[in-house]
Image (cartoon, grey):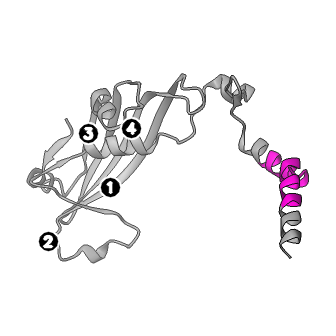
Amino acid sequence: MLKWAVQSLLKHRDHPLMFKETLMLKESLQKREADILNATPFVVDGELTVDQRAVIARVHVVGALTVPSTRSLEPVDLPMDFEFTEIYVDPEDEQLNRFTDEDILFPFEGEALELQVAIEDHILLHIPSHILTPEEEHDDVMPAGQSWTVISEEAYAKQQADEEITPNPEFAKLKQLLEDQSDDAD
């Protein structure tokens, strides 16, 4: 568990506190995101640096998720290897102006700094919104069924452009009918 008492972290002003741990996050990730089918153990390493009354966490995360394809719902292995940095501060620190507006500051919650929730947050943020199996990427095959088919955005745009050029004959008949009725009303 990646949890440290804030007071013990403040003793590491002279040198960063290095850490490396393997986390089993499958259950907690599945509770937060039902689409996650499986998760390998995640290897998490990094360092905590104390800057006055703030702690800067630099974290490197490596692991993999199994998630459904957004097209066919087939399982897709999604390798993950990313880094993130977060700054944890004492909300009563009067020198918070030393950070820039671009820095995102997180207040210490209680007497301990726990990184597991932050790691889970970043794992979930790194799941892309468009996930395809290798076959779907290579063949660009869309699912279809009886009287329906999925089409790409490009094909949809072309279809819309073609429909604008070729008017629907039923609408032309309706337009003529409405014109006839307006002529009769005069």
Residue 178 screen position, x and y as percent: 83, 62
Which residue is located at x 14 percent, y 45 percent? 4
Q: Amino acid at mark 1?
A: Glu
Which residue is denoted by mark 4 in the rendering?
A: 61
Q: Amino acid at mark 2?
A: Glu
Q: Amino acid at mark 4?
A: Val
Labels 3 & 4 near each other (Cβ < 8 A): no
User: Helix, strand or loop at disc 2?
Assistant: loop
Q: Earlier in the sequence, mark 4 or mark 1?
A: 4
Labelled disc at residue 92: 2
Q: Nearer the viewer, mark 3 or mark 1?
A: 1
Disc 4/disc 1 C-alpha distance (Å): 14 Å
Labelled disc at residue 86: 1
Disc 3/disc 4 C-alpha distance (Å): 12 Å
Which quarter of the figure has residue 115? top left
Is the residue marked by circle 4 packed among few (<14), some (14-19), or many (20+) residues within 10 Å?
Answer: many
Q: Is residue 171 one of those drawn in magenta?
A: yes
Which residue is denoted by mark 3 in the rendering?
A: 19
